[in-house]
Image (cartoon, rainbow, N blue to C red):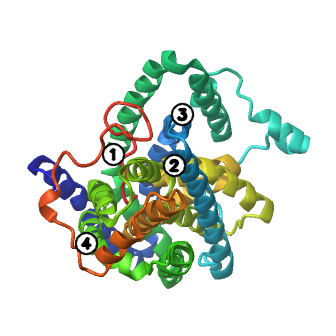
Amino acid sequence: MAGGGRTKKKDRTHLLYVSVIVAVVLGIIIGFMAPDFAQQLKPLGTAFIGLIKMMIAPVIFCTIVLGVGSIAKAATVGKVGGLALGYFIIMSTFALAIGLIVGNIIQPGAGLDLGATGFEAEAGEEEAAGTVGFLLSIIPTTLFSALTAGSILQTLFMALLVGFALQKMGPSGVPILRGIGYLQTLVFRILVMIMWLAPIGAFGAIAAVVGETGLDAIISLGTLMIAFYITCALFIVVILGGLLKLVTGINIFKLMRYLAREYLLIVSTSSSEVALPRLIAKMEHLGVAKPVVGVTVPTGYSFNLDGTAIYLTMAALFVAEALGKPLQLGEQISLLVFMIIASKGAAGVTGAGLATLAGGLQSHRPDLVEGVGLIVGIDRFMSEARALTNFTGNAVATVLIGKWTQEMDPEQVDRVLAGADPFDEATMDEDHGYTGTEPVGTPGHPYKQHAH
């Protein structure tokens, strides 16, 4: 139950989402009515993507360092933490692969051929030297140059080094980890400020695209949205539902009906963060042991991002196809590996998903980064599907981990899902939620999962 201050914050965020939708509609209208003028609005979208690109390195660095720290903390919990982490990594990878497969089958951006983005990719040494040169290029010139002038792969490499070094430092590394947690809070605050310019960026990007391609752009963007929604629905029903039925015998639709109020909260606030304390309480009421819930749910909010994973790969393929520069199979596989690591911070805050998408493209195909502007306009329309898929994945994971560790009461589960033991809303209060079991031991709650 959110207090007054929190409700006000959600309302302001909702205003941003509505503004983006209005901007997209206006951009489409301008694109049709005055195509020549609309194409001159492209710099608005380019400027917004420039601001997002500016934040890629600090977002990737902070989330990966804290992510490595959270792995260490979860692993120390023992069997539950290790099992949960293993499951989350496998499912997120599986979701990323599904996004790639569906994106290759649907090819929603094919035919747009928006041509050059104005970015001239420089022929780097790695291109001349092949694989060896590419691997050597991952090593930054200095420890800090990766954050300023290096590639995203250099940032990723340095973040992994720092994260594992902090692990080895033990208790003496905790203050540094806490400091990086504060730095992440600052980075996300800047990102939130930038996202308030999203309506302007979306307006310019959509207007320019529609002005250049006309109805084709609307059809392609609509195809991507519909394909993404269908993919998420099938992932929930077939993959998660099938796994849940096979392992526990529980029907996915009964579990979703039990969590109906949480789904409504997520849709109305466009944030799955608001449902986190309720998910913890409801999973405990369902019959899953408190320690299992306390480890699995918070860790899942950082690592089990099935909807976000599907979105990242499908969006990357769309951008490449729309610009007439499709990704080759080798590039898709290497992008998949990058996303497996980088997607662990993609739900950190509004706009972090866009930053991760831009980071993935910049690390593999810098000439495609400006195409992220195409996604800004429809990102809002896909946010609910991402949040609902992530939330459902975490709920299913909690039940599965409870079953595998034999820390779940099957009889209680049957009673609750049958409606014989309804959840008492009066038991929900502000104290229920994060109680020291967060995956990262940093101040506040740095891994707040939003729909974006």
Tell me if residue 222 comes above or below residue 399 in the rendering: below
Q: Is 365 left, or right, of 254 in this rendering?
A: right
Q: How far across and down, in percent of the image, does residue 65 sit?
A: 54, 33
The residue singled out by tag 3 in the image is 65
Q: How far across and down, in percent of the image, does residue 302 sit?
A: 46, 49
Q: How far across and down, in percent of the image, does residue 361 sit?
A: 63, 53
The residue singled out by tag 4 in the image is 264
Identity of the residue drawn at 60% across and 76% down: 112
What is the quadrant of residue 256 in the picture?
bottom left
Do residues under tags 2 and 4 come within 8 Å of each other at their CB atoms?
no
Q: Residues within 10 Å of mark 4 (few under 14, many from 20)?
A: few
Rounded to the nearest angstrom, the CA distance separating label 1 from label 4 is: 24 Å
The amino acid pointed to by label 2 is Val
Dot in front, 2 or 3: 2
- For mark 4, give the secondary structure: helix
Point out the tag, 2 or 4, that comes first from the N-terminus. 2
The amino acid pointed to by label 3 is Val
Do residues under tags 4 and 3 come within 8 Å of each other at their CB atoms?
no
Q: Is 426 left, or right, of 166 in this rendering?
A: left
Do residues under tags 1 and 3 come within 8 Å of each other at their CB atoms?
no
- For mark 3, give the secondary structure: helix
Q: What mark, if any, has residue 356 been given in the picture?
A: none
Rounded to the nearest angstrom, the CA distance separating label 4 from label 3 is: 33 Å
- Towards the viewer: 43 or 67: 67
The residue singled out by tag 1 in the image is 192
- For mark 2, give the secondary structure: helix
